[in-house]
Amino acid sequence: MSMSAFSSLGSFGLALSALELSSLDKSACQGLRFILSDFDDTLTWEGRLPVDTLRALAQLEANGIKVIPVTGGCAGWSDMIARSLPVDGVITEGGACFIGKTPDRHLSYAFWREEAEMRAEQARLLTQVNQLLAEYPRLRLARDQAYRLTDVAIDYAQDVKPAAIADKDACLAALIAMGLNAKASSIHINVCSQGYDKFSMAQRVLGEVYGLTEAQQQEQVLYVGDAPNDESMFARFPLSVGVANIAEHLHKMQHRPRYQTRQPGGLGFAELADVILSAR
């Protein structure tokens, strides 16, 4: 662990409503088959993928636990994640697309709706967002917008430093008032078509690709995240974990994780992996 990461740990407290990982039932860990995880500030920390996180991903895979990142990140970046990391696939752009792997390890793309329909909707959203951004000069389209297939991402804390929190809150409220489907992650506002979110695509993937019933999903899947755009997952999966840096968002979240790590980001993910694997 780097000294900068170590020095950050003291700024996060355990949520009053969350349980420590030591409370995670060993029998639940033994029955676990899938971990769905947010990416930015859940698998990463301070903009990088910690060595401890990569080691945890490899150990989970070796122990038969499939990890599927569920991210608001762009499809282009998620393609790289699916190809390069020990994960079983990636749900990308907030639930718009699942990048899976065929038996011979090639990638396959499955969109929430027809790809052409979603691309056309993205073009309409981009026009609306560009018009609104004129009112918020500190905000900008995310640098990865050109690599997105379905949604529009507004950067408020990735390359915008210091983070434009007030502008983010005002812009998010304006987007919602316009009737748009907009949610904030730890770095972006993501604007996408109506009708899907992280959970709806996760449920489809778990059912149609992996053959899990809803009851099996409740018992065999754990979700870990760090931000308000993870609420749909925290609300539906009894096994839910927030990494420590979620503490700053909890006051504005209706659905919170059941458990919380003591370490932030990818360091917290590695902490979680250690608890799960030690119980198996």
Image (tube, grey):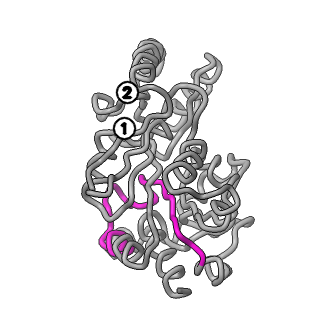
Specify which label sits upstream in the sequence, 2 or 1. 2
Residues rendered magenta in the picture: 31-56
Where is residue 183 drawn, in percent x and y? 56, 35
Where, quadrant-wise, is the N terminus in this rendering?
Answer: bottom left
Residue 183 colored in magenta in the image: no
Q: Amino acid at mark 2?
A: Arg
Where is residue 7 drawn, in percent x and y? 41, 72
Q: Amino acid at mark 1?
A: Val
What's the mark number on residue 145? none
Q: Are marks 2 and 1 in contact (CB under 8 Å)?
A: yes
Q: Is residue 99 left or right of residue 21?
A: left
SS under mark 1: loop
Residue picked out by circle 1:
160
Where is residue 182 drawn, in percent x and y? 56, 30
The main secondary structure of the magenta stretch is loop
Residue at 49% x, 28% y is 113
Residue closer to the observer: 70 or 206? 206
Residue at 44% x, 19% y is 117
Residue 133 visible (yes or no): no
Residue picked out by circle 2:
140
Residue at 32% x, 68% y is 50
Q: Is residue 228 left or right of residue 88?
A: right
